[in-house]
Image (cartoon, grey):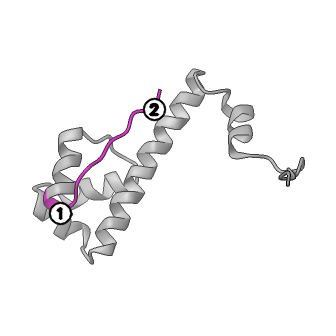
Amino acid sequence: MKKQTDKNITTLDQILDSKYGKRGVEKREKWEQEFESFRLGILLEEARLKLGMTQEELAEKCGTTKSYISRIENNASDIRLSTLMKIIQQGLGGHLKLTLQL
């Protein structure tokens, strides 16, 4: 049985292609990078909330400030890998797994 596709549906990639250009174009790559930073902030916030922790409690456990945790969660600050690992390991008691896509 063949899967029928709806020609009236626009995919996210099609929208991004038209607004920012195809992958590899500088404007699109900037958007992709900013999205990943946003996504990271959401993942950290969800993990913190799942553990029932406040930003202040998380900051105290990993040796940073509440305002820094807030900036990360709200995508207002770049984060160093070493700091990210400290937040995940010491603050949240988790492990970081990375993947690389080419």
Which sits earlier in the primary sequence, circle 2 or circle 1? Answer: 1
Residue 30, given in percent of the width and then of the height, sits at 51, 30
Report the number of numbered marks.
2
Going 47% across and 26% down the picture, which residue do you hit?
Answer: 102
In space, the residues marked 2 and 1 are separated at their CA atoms by: 26 Å
Pinpoint residue 40: horizontal percent, then vertical percent: 39, 50
User: Residue 18's image quarter?
Assistant: top right
| Stretch in magenta | 90-102
* The stretch drawn in magenta includes residue 98: yes
Between 53 and 67, which is closer to the camera in this rendering? 53
User: What mark, if any, has residue 101 been given in the picture?
Assistant: 2
Q: Residue furthest front?
A: 1
Q: Type of residue at label 1? A: Gly
- Name the residue type under label 2: Gln
Position above or below: 61 against 85:
below
Residue shown at 26%/57% (left/top)? 69
In percent of width and height, residue 56 lies at 19, 68
> Closer to the camera, 41 or 92?
92
Residue behind mark 1: 93
Q: Position of residue 21 (x, y in %)?
A: 68, 27
Judge depth for marks 2 and 1 and give the one in front.
Answer: 2
Magenta span has 13?
Answer: no
Residue 12, quarter of picture: top right
Question: Badge 2: few (under 14), some or many (20 or more) residues near its Cα, within 10 Å?
Answer: few
Q: Residue furthest bottom?
A: 52
